[in-house]
Image: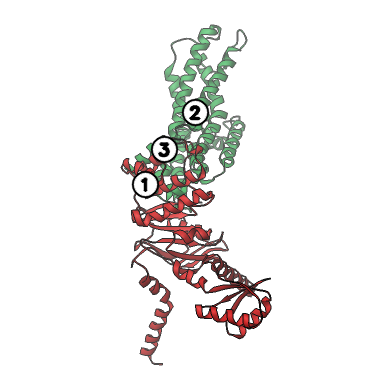
Chain colours: A green, B red
Amino acid sequence: MSDLLRATSIECFKLRRTLALWASLLVPLLVTVMTTALGLSRGTGARFLPEQVTPWDGMTGVVLSLWCLVGLPLFVALMTALLAGLEHREHAWRHLFALPIPRWTIYVAKLLVGGGLLCLSSCVLAVGMALEGVLIHTLRPDLGLSLPIPWDLILLRTLSFTLASALLLAVQTWVAIRWRSFVVALGLGIGGAVTTVVLRNVNESSSFAPVARFFPWSQPYFAFTYPQASIFVVAILGGVCIAALGCWEVVRRDVE
Amino acid sequence: MDGDSRTRFRTLEVIFFHVDAIYFLTEGTVTDFAIETAGLTRHFGAVRAVDNLSLHVPRGSVYAFLGPNGAGKTTTIRMLLGLTHPDHGDIRIFGTPLTRTTRRACLRRIGALAETPSVYPHLTGFENLQVTQRLLAQDPSSIERVLRIVGLEDDAHRLVHTYSLGMRQRLGIALALLASPELLILDEPTNGLDPAGIHEMRDLIRSFPVVHGITVFLSSHLLAEVEQVASHVGIIGNARLLFEGMLDHLQQRERDRVVIEVDRPQVAVSILRQAGWNVERVEASCVTATLPSRADLARAATALVNSGLSLYQLRTERSSLEGLFLDLTGKADRASRVSEEVLR
């Protein structure tokens, strides 16, 4: 266990001056800035999504839709590729795997730090949504957002999509570590995001519904729009299984 | 032949077969090996990367592992570090077999620079060393120690992306030295360095066995480099080991060659051959012959002059490994082509 703790602390140490750390702060911030601008530019008398129960539901729904459909899949692809790229760039895998430490600790440490950055981006998004609400409340009181900030709603939704990202994180981490090319990991993320945009319109009664719910890239979206236990079970158990499989494969294979 | 005689004969045969290894043992200054491999083989699909390789790297030596590009040097080094798994064969590190279960115990005694230095350009040299020092739970003072050895104290707090290639190589060696290894494995450590960098690296490598008691196993295709630092040499060509022994023995084989510059080389060739000497090469104005002793040299010169030839120059070929290396690897290439044709 001390090996894993050391490897994880070193992964955090290596984050200094990296884009991965900045991306975790800036990408969710960018999404909230964009949705704030959209909110403020709404016409007089406009309301947030009419089917939502409250204006805060509507506002967070707009932010989370944009985040879970496009932002999150691309962010996870970019972040995991950048983390793995730290080792790919100068062939540091050779150095790390030739050290007298258990190889699995390096893989698991990468996964843990990836999870940590995902949580960080979720926190930034949660705070960003709260600030967006306050700003719209101040500048556009006609849109109906009232104070105090509904932290329970924001945190519950944030927790839902973050937990539902476990499988997505495990898949992207494996791909990013397994293939040296940045294009493979990013291409997969873009493909996943595009597919999610298509799948979000799948009717609940359709035979495609289970595919849509359990597709790793669309799980965060469905986790906050139609929160069902099965989504979280598949995301977490699937994430653990894929993480274990990826670790086993990467540790055993020859190092390029 | 009765059973006992057959057994005795077989024993003699085995002894004879391993005479090189025994010679190697008795001639060396040490009697045990830092690295031993037996029948090491690795294929990548249909390509044979390493074939039946048996290495003996004496403790305390600087062992140069030579071969042209693609000969199998890097694959061998990766197998020694457990990065690539062999199809067949055994590896022993200081007598301990390298397996999945003993990997960590073996690697604790090894420091390695595998091909290009594995460094993080966005970190400083010091931070790069901290990464490995903390992963290995080493004392923080080890960082200062290795920086001193490789002479990077003054640049330790600069970002690595501002380092020259030579500084990166030195940082790579510092990383390899962090855990105070008994064996240092360096894959092409002078690759891409300028002459000054090569000179510095050569001095550094030469100091390891003497000052720090570290055995060095280094691969190279720059033969002139190896001559000045290595005590032992292994030559690999076409995935097979072509020569293994002390550098002096290899050089001795080369010293017998004499280059004779004359006005009529073809006439010189027939005179030398008639006298029983071996002629290896004939060029426009030179003949290269094997003249094993000084007496042979004097007799050959007299014979040529007495035959009316104008003798311009007579020199022993410089004891570079280049010629022998090219001979050995060239023969391996030819042998490989022949066997491929036979198979077809």
Q: Nearer the viewer, mark 2 or mark 3?
A: 3
How far is the residue under mark 1 from the one under mark 3? 18 Å
Hey, which quadrant is residue B101 in on the image? bottom left
Residue denoted by label 1: B178
Residue B338 as seen in the image, left or right of residue B231: right
For label 3, the residue is: B154
Q: Which numbered mark, 1 or 2, is in the foreground of this view?
A: 1
Q: Nearer the viewer, mark 1 or mark 3?
A: 3
Are there few (<14), some (14-19), or many (20+) residues within 10 Å of tag 1?
many
Residue A200 in picture, x, y percent from top left: 58, 30
Question: Can you give x and y, in whole percent of width and height, for residue B248 in the image?
Answer: 44, 68
Q: Give the side of residue B297 with respect to residue B32, left or right.
A: right
Q: Is residue B48 at all visible to an observer of this figure?
A: yes
Q: Amino acid at mark 1?
A: Leu
- Check if mark 2 and mark 3 are on a common chain: no
**A164 versus B165 height, above or below:** above
Q: Which residue is mark 2?
A: A22
